[in-house]
């Protein structure tokens, strides 16, 4: 599960807003510029998020790690990153370190330090924040993390509905992006055993599909096919005739390939056969391999 979390974090991190970081970490940030930290090949991991931030007249380096598990080696990793950042930046800035913990249980192991040592980082447990904090952001890739936050007195089903409504609204007109965010939401929801709830509520929600912008509809009008007949054609293809949906599905597969999306899952999302889903997925993989 933690590997899937890492993939979601890496895919969405470029959209992570500093305004949200300021609220989560509870530190004022007036200005920020992302910093690329080049590590030696012997270092297997790279820091998740590093930025040079200005707070008033002072400049610091902000380092954030996103952690799905209560890792016992967090102290060592933080110290290594801290030293590398100091060296790269010429030892002229303080390094502010935070670990944003995505798990549900209270973290304990990651807060431990060796004898006579003190943790220099602060652990931020995402579950302590209201889910509404993440829904206030205008980015669907950020909204999905609301599923890991604090629901308060709001029923789980209502929270899931709020999240899906928000990402559907923001992804309007971009079906591939909506399906990508929905897929990521399902993965995150597994930690709270809410995946089935996400699937059920999504299936109950109407997906707005503007038939008048469908290429098959426009081509049908040119050929003189009536609107009723065109709607029947589109409806039939949406139920499983894959010809008109190939490009949409292929685009979705390209965007979610690093999440190891299975043919079974693709078939379920788009209402097509597993055989066709497997064929399209293999086609995308071959296409990407040919471009290398």
Image (tube, helix red, strand yellow):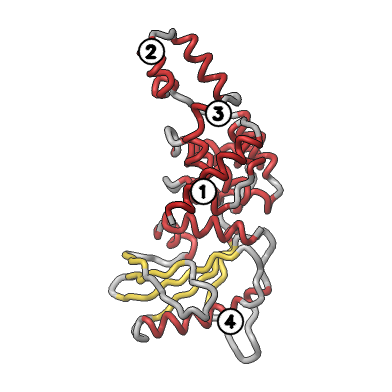
- Give the foreground label among 1 and 3: 1
Give the number of the mark in front: 4 or 3: 3
Residue holding disc 4 = 76
In screen coordinates, is 197 left or right of 39? right
Q: CA distance from mark 2 to mark 1?
A: 35 Å
On residue 242, which mark appears? 3
* Image height of 56 relative to 206, above or below: below
Extreme-bottom residue of the structure? 116
Q: Which mark is residue 232?
A: none
* First reached walking from the N terminus: tag 2 or tag 3: 2
- Disc 4 secondary structure class: helix
Q: Mark 4 or mark 2, which is nearer to you? A: 2
Q: Position of residue 62 (x, y in %)?
A: 42, 72
Which of the image's four quarters has the N terminus? bottom right
- Which circle's residue, 1 or 4, is located before the other in the chain? 4
| 30 is higher (above) or lower (below) than 150 | below
The residue identified by callout 1 is: 286
Q: Secondary structure at mark 3?
A: loop
């Amino acid at each position: 599960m933690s590997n899937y979390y890492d993939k979601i974090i890496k895919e969405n991190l470029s959209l992570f807003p500093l305004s949200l970081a300021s609220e989560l970490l509870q530190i004022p940030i007036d200005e920020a510029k992302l910093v690329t930290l080049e590590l030696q090949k012997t270092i297997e991991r790279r820091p998740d998020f590093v930025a040079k931030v200005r707070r008033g007249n002072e400049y610091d380096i902000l380092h954030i790690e996103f952690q799905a598990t209560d890792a016992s080696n967090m102290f060592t990793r933080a110290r290594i990153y801290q030293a590398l950042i100091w060296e790269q930046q010429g030892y002229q800035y303080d390094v502010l370190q935070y670990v944003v913990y995505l798990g549900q249980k209270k973290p304990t192991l990651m807060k431990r330090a060796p004898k006579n040592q003190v943790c220099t980082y602060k652990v931020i447990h995402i579950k302590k924040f209201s889910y509404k904090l993440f829904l206030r952001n205008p980015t669907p890739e950020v909204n999905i993390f609301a599923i890991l936050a604090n629901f308060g007195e709001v029923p789980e089903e209502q929270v899931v509905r709020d999240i899906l409504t928000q990402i559907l609204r923001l992804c309007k007109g971009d079906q591939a992006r909506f399906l990508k965010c929905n897929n990521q939401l399902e993965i995150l929801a597994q930690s709270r055993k809410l995946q089935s709830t996400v699937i059920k509520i999504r299936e109950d929600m109407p997906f707005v599909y503007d038939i008048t912008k469908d290429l098959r509809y426009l081509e049908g009008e040119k050929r003189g096919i009536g609107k009723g007949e065109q709607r029947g054609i589109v409806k039939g293809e949406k139920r499983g005739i894959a010809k008109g949906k190939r490009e949409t599905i292929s685009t979705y597969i390209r965007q979610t390939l690093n999440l190891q999306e299975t043919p079974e899952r693709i078939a379920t999302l788009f209402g097509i056969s597993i055989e066709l889903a497997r064929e399209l997925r293999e086609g995308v993989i071959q296409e990407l391999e040919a471009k290398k």
